[in-house]
Image: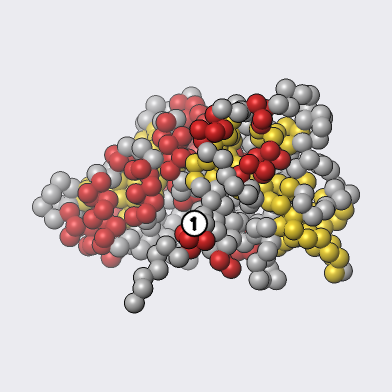
Amino acid sequence: MPEGTAAGLARKPTAYAASRMLPTRTQLSQAYPIASSVDADGRLQLGGCDALALAREFGTPAYIVAEDDLRARAQTFVEAFRARTKDFDVLFASKAFPCTAVAKVLAGEGLGCDVASGGELALALRGGFDPARIYLHGNAKSLVELHEARAAGVGHVVIDNADEIERLEAVVGDEEPQRVLLRVTPDVRGETNDKISTGQADSKFGFSMADAPAAIARLRASAQLDLAGLHMHIGSQILELDPFRRAIEAIADLGDFSTYNLGGGLGVAYTAAHQPPRIGDYVAAKIETANRVLGPGKRLLEEPGRALVANSTVTLYTVQSVKHNVSRWVAVDGGMSDNLRPMLYGAVYEAQIADRFGGGTPSRLTGKHCESGDVIVRDVELADPRVGDIVVTPATGAYGYAMASNYNGVPRPPVIFVSGGDARVVVRRETYDDLGSRDVDG
């Protein structure tokens, strides 16, 4: 389907907002963006926009982002820290949703940023983040990326390994020293998938607790690098608070520093069954533990990614076929090219027909790709699914767009911002011409 332009949409917001004032009859799970609803006609409303109208205008698959949700979660993180400590910074872990428009919103809400590559650095700068509040991560930073960080004026580089110390010293040379943090692995892990756990002793990230003291001494002796403090991260999609407390306690014996980056990792609700801690409780647990074991008055940094963006976004699909081969297979026009998480590490999602909420028909929601594993939701009840129905999967803001691919030659979906009954394209849908845009004849 053709996509509308932002200018065109600005002239006709009522096409989307017509039913937004009708009473809600269905209670949505917390996986959906803040202020989403199902109206009296049974149709999903997102940011004051009708989901079926969005699908008609922009086509499917499409990432629909509730801009107000992004802003609200950013504000909640900042206020939770401000209420408990004076010296802090909240940094958007941009790998979760590396999109210029998302960066602009979160930079506008006063956040800093962490990046894990030269490309993410370029997007962060394009999105308006202050270079002094950008932190460069990565376990295999190239010489080019370190030069790019220096040229951009990146405030801190997070040192991940001994090879990087020498490489960065060479990049700095006789210039002003580079502020750095040392990443350590506290040998603490939360209950999460192995593929997104990072705090265990045998990790690709950071220095072990045994090796960290020598690295700290090496950095303190460096004329090119200025060690500000420590960084740690134990993994993501963690739904308990105790692992975060234990990780902070674990690094307390490594020395006294002015700055501690406590990572991120707070889990989110992908389904109604998930009950993540409230942001305020999560922040309180970290700050109270830091004050107790690291000492009061430290500069504390937080790196939320998933917890900022996951629930801001839903993906809309169109059903292409329904068949019964032992299971009932409901196939849509997307799949692993726009949401790899279920295939990569078994992530679980909800799904609904966008204008017929409720179950009734046990189904498997599958993608269009030539892989048996291309299943978006393995066990889901849909309301009498039919060809042409619009299906919605919530909580796709984290690592959906970020991991999207062109598998099977499928163009990547657009990103659509919705707010106040208006909608605008912030990333256009790829075209077939885009698929060959990097080809070189010869």
Classify 209 as above or below 418: below
Residue occupying image coordinates x 63% and y 41%: 57
Report which residue position mark 1 lands on.
199
**Mark 1 falls on what kind of element?**
loop
Residue at 78% over, 24% down: 23
- In-image side of 386 versus 51 (left or right): right
Q: Residue furthest left?
A: 174
Query: Residue 344 placed where, x, y %?
Result: 60, 64
With 108 as the anchor, is 257 left or right in this view? left
Residue 311 in picture, x, y percent from top left: 61, 41
Residue 127 vs 96, above or below: the answer is above
Q: Nearer the viewer, residue 67 or 386?
A: 386
Q: Percent position (x, y) of residue 62?
A: 61, 48
* Number of residues whose C-alpha sits closer than 10 Å to that of mark 1, classed few (under 14), some (14–19) or many (20 or more): many
Which residue lies at the image location 44% right of the left edge and 57% below the top edge? 185
In which quadrant is the C terminus drawn? bottom left
Instruction: Tell me: residue 29, above or below residue 367.
Output: above
Provide residue 340's location: percent of width, then percent of height.
Answer: 60, 60
Q: Quadrant of residue 127?
A: top left
Q: Between 244 and 419, which is closer to the camera in this rendering?
A: 419
Q: Is residue 193 visible?
A: no
Outermost residue toward the bottom in this view: 442
